[in-house]
Image (cartoon, grey):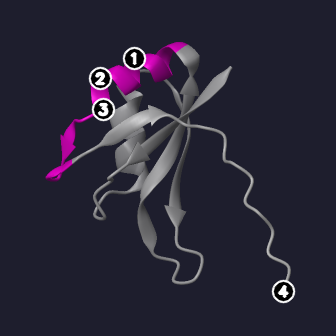
Amino acid sequence: MPKSIYVGNIPFSASEEDLRSLFGQYGEVLSVKFINDRETGRFRGFGFVEMDDASAKEAIDALNGKEVSGRALRINEAQERQPRPRRDY
């Protein structure tokens, strides 16, 4: 079963392919997604990687805190997004 991994503090110079090859050292990467700002379309510095359970655990343990282009990556298991309260105007 695939596991989603949160990857924070990604250097703005990094590409999705860079993350795919970094995580690929620990197993098959099923998907990589960078998160962009809704209004500006600019990369927000974090994203998600999907891998199988065993590979994900190994990648999280090995890569959390790893420095990439001068920035220490923050990596952990992604949490389900909490529902946001609706605003009725």
Q: Residue type at mark 1?
A: Glu
Element type at mark 1: helix
Could you tell me how far apart the alpha carbons at marks 3 and 4 are, in whole angstroms? 42 Å
Queried whether the magenta region covers residue 60, the answer comes back as yes
Which one is closest to the eye, mark 2 or mark 4?
A: 4
Label 2–label 4 contact, CB within 8 A: no
Of the numbered discs 1 and 3, the one sitting upstream in the chain is 1
Q: Which residue is mark 1?
A: 58
Queried whether the magenta region covers residue 38, the answer comes back as no
Of the numbered discs 2 and 4, the one sitting upstream in the chain is 2
Q: Residue type at mark 3?
A: Asn
Q: Which residue is mark 3?
A: 64
Q: How far across and down, in percent of the image, does residue 42 sit?
A: 45, 75
Of the numbered discs 3 and 4, the one sitting upstream in the chain is 3
Label 1–label 2 contact, CB within 8 A: yes
Q: Which residue is mark 4?
A: 89
Picture quarter containing residue 66? top left
Label 4–label 1 contact, CB within 8 A: no
